[in-house]
Image (cartoon, rainbow, N blue to C red):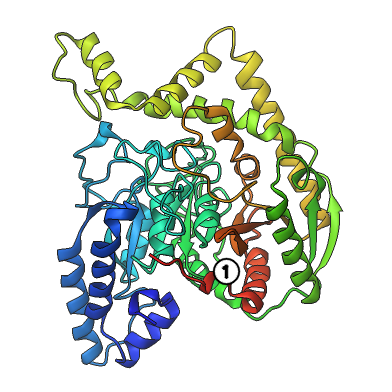
Amino acid sequence: MELNQLTIREVHEKLQSGEISSLDLVNACIERIKKTDKKLHCFLATDFDNAIKQAKEVDKKIKKGGKLKILEGIPCGIKDLILTKGITTTASSKMLENYVPLFDATVIKRLKDNGAIILGKHNCDAWGHGGSTENSDYGPSHNPWDLERVPGGSSGGSAASTASDQVIYSLGTDTGGSIRCPASHCGCVGFKPTYGRVPRFGTIAMGSSLDTIGPIAKCVDDAAIILNIIAGLDPKDSTTLPKEVPDYTKMKDKGVKGLTIGLPKEAFGKGLQPEVKSLMQIAIRDLEKLGAKFKEVSLKYLDYGLACYYIIMPSEVSSNLGRYDGIRYGHQSKEADNLFEIYTKSRAEGFGAEAKRRIMIGTYVLSAGYYDAYYKKAMQVRTLIKEDFEKVLSEVDLILMPTSPRPAFKIGENVNDPLTMYLEDIYTVTINMAGVPAASIPCGFVNNLPVGMQLIAKQFGEEKIFQAAYAYEAINGWNRIKPKI
Ligand code: GLN
């Protein structure tokens, strides 16, 4: 096995024992990136020199017999929506083309405090708007399982990069599925925490009441290690809660005996590709064999999730993107002759088509006369959705359903059809509206394309997801199968 194919725990142990060096590992990742990224286009910016410098320091520490922190000397990649001090961060948008942050997002600070080495920034749909990376202003990333296909999105660069072993792990963001969907399409473990579990400070806002940050990893254990580090109260994000962060890696050998898992009937009906459904059924049987009990449940508002999401999310988008006006933030047009033109031309030039579509929808549904009919109504339905999840998750420990209705689609297949594109998120967006945690765990392949299943828990119930995911992964190991690129 190549060094860059190892997991965090494997690397950590080998580094500590002196079996491998951080420099060799970092170089293995850099070589892999140089070899594959022309095809995959996962990276928008790299910071190799710094990474090498850091690796050498770690190796010196090991030689002196120093004890390594869990992420020390281990290279990762970061979605371009998360601010990294000194490394260009564009949100994959031309609007922020040359923006170099002066500070780190809280999650980055926490990774760095634990010794993480950042290799660079991962491509995504601009501002997180999308499910395929085709909305990146810098061109799409490609799926390592089939280069003609999308890696999912919006954190597609992160998932493709992790799946193809360019990095050991990565961080993504999830507002409506952007960690889980690409994790599913690339064969990674993607973990979207409870809203408020992981601080958003320093992450470019998409929909502030929906945004979450989490790991995209090669195995459940790595996701647990990362979440342990990035979760927890942050005085700079008032939506984080002063709740203790349990050690998620402790769930490793708990098994699933005694867990009851709900299967929402609404999620297994029309629209779900039969081959994906069969994989879900096999996964259910596996978990049953391990001792979990299953029960049919009903999430009666699941069908309304998408419609509400595409009102609430654009409303928040239109407000969050208001600051990029060429004066306060972002690209400034060279064609402008007066203040009004600075605003209009800078925004016209800086934003791509999808960002504009969402700004217009958001502005429309928030405008006087339409607010009550759209935004207020959607917020009322959101409450029903939240209550729906609360009720079901008081009867069962977890919910299991697909992450995506089908495996990765071809690049270009949906670009002229935003509605079909939005439908790809049918199983994920509702979870963000309820604010509950969910993970996508690899559960097999359809025509050599990976498929993920989704495990959902009640708010701050991350441990149970890990409990089931650890047990399932231990008897399957779908995550260990590598794409040939
Ligand atoms: N694909 C969804 C959208 O386009 C989700 C995006 C996200 O989670 N950032 O909005």
| Side of 168 relative to 344 (left or right) | right
**Number of other residues with Cα within 10 Å of mark 1, as a class: few under 14, some 14 to 19, many 20 or more:** some
Q: Is mark 1 within 8 Å of ligand 1?
A: no
Query: Quarter of the image containing the N terminus?
Result: bottom left
User: In the image, residue 264 lies at what x, y percent?
Assistant: 79, 49
Can residue 121 be seen in the rendering of this structure?
Answer: no
Residue at (64% x, 33% y) in the render: 306
Along the viewing direction, whichever of 222 and 148 lies nearer the viewer: 148
| Side of 465 relative to 129 (left or right) | right
Along the viewing direction, whichever of 10 and 476 lies nearer the viewer: 476
User: In the image, residue 366 lies at what x, y percent?
Assistant: 53, 16
Figure disc tally: 1
Can residue 73 be seen in the rendering of this structure?
Answer: yes
| Side of 83 relative to 304 (left or right) | left
Query: Quarter of the image containing the C terminus?
Result: bottom left
Q: Secondary structure at mark 1?
A: loop
Quarter holding residue 32: bottom left
Quarter holding residue 56: bottom left
Which amino acid, by three-letter code, is at mark 1?
Pro
Identify the residue position indicated by label 1 in the image: 246
Residue at (41% x, 63% y) in the render: 162
Q: Is residue 422 above or below residue 443?
A: above
User: In the image, residue 388 lies at what x, y percent?
Assistant: 77, 41
| Side of 46 relative to 456 (left or right) | left
Residue at (25% x, 88% y) in the render: 62
User: In the image, residue 405 lies at what x, y percent?
Assistant: 65, 46
